[in-house]
Image (cartoon, helix red, strand yellow):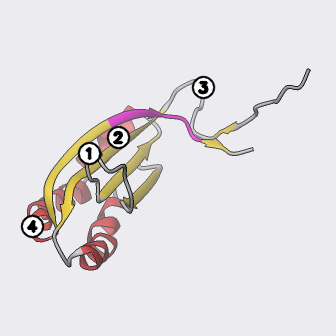
């Protein structure tokens, strides 16, 4: 009888604890003609601040390129993964977090017609076989 074996390396758990990923989901539409400028602003201004969040394990910046026809549009998603809740608390209290947060009202006025949503998820990271 044929069978398959699934094996994966879990990078994110130590001692059974899950890492935490805090998502900042930018929901809405990029203002017409502003996509390239928005990406440059994120990469040149916001991402360097996000990378300074104390306690962060990984910082991922994702730009939306495609979604289902009836799905909401998420032109930008920030995902910062922390080893634990204490590290996430340090990240949320860091100076860089407040600096980046203070830039968001103007960012939305200039680049995105929408809103910001936050979610925290337990995270396991698996390497493909």
| Residue that badge 2 annotates | 88
Mark earlier in primary sequence (1, 3): 3
| Residue that badge 3 annotates | 15
Q: Distance between the residues labelled 4 and 2?
A: 25 Å
- Local secondary structure at mark 2: helix
Residues marked 2 and 3 touching at CB (< 8 Å): no
- Local secondary structure at mark 3: loop
Mark earlier in primary sequence (3, 4): 3
Q: Distance between the residues labelled 4 and 1?
A: 20 Å
| Residue that badge 1 annotates | 92
* In the rendered image, the vertical position of residue 59 relative to residue 48, given as above or below: above
Residues marked 1 and 3 touching at CB (< 8 Å): no
User: Which one is closest to the eye, mark 4 or mark 2?
Assistant: 4
Q: Which residue appears at 15% of the width and 66% of the height?
A: 107
Quadrant for residue 88, please give it. Answer: top left
Q: Tell me, yes or no, if residue 55 can be seen here.
A: no
Residue lying at the far top of the rendered structure: 1
Residues marked 4 and 2 touching at CB (< 8 Å): no
What are the residue bounds of the magenta stretch? 120-125
* In the rendered image, the vertical position of residue 123 relative to residue 34, given as above or below: above
Residues marked 4 and 1 touching at CB (< 8 Å): no
Q: Distance between the residues labelled 2 and 3?
A: 18 Å
Left or right: 10 as drawn, with respect to 95? right
Q: Nearer the viewer, residue 30 or 110?
A: 30
Quadrant for residue 81, please give it. Answer: top left
Residues marked 2 and 1 touching at CB (< 8 Å): yes
| Residue that badge 4 annotates | 106
Q: Which of 118 and 46 is in front in this view?
A: 118
Q: Position of residue 71 (x, y in %)?
A: 29, 46
């Amino acid at each position: 009888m044929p069978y398959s074996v699934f094996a994966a390396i879990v990078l994110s758990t130590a001692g059974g604890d899950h890492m935490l990923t805090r998502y900042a989901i930018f929901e809405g539409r990029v203002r017409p003609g502003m996509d390239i400028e928005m990406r440059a602003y994120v990469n040149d201004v916001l991402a360097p601040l996000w990378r300074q969040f104390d306690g962060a394990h990984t910082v991922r910046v994702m730009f939306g390129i495609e979604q289902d026809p009836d799905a909401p549009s998420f032109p930008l998603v920030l995902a910062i993964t922390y080893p634990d809740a204490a590290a996430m608390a340090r990240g949320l209290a860091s100076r860089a977090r407040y600096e980046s947060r203070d830039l968001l009202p103007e960012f939305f006025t200039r680049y995105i017609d929408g809103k910001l949503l936050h979610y925290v998820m337990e995270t396991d990271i698996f390497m493909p076989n």
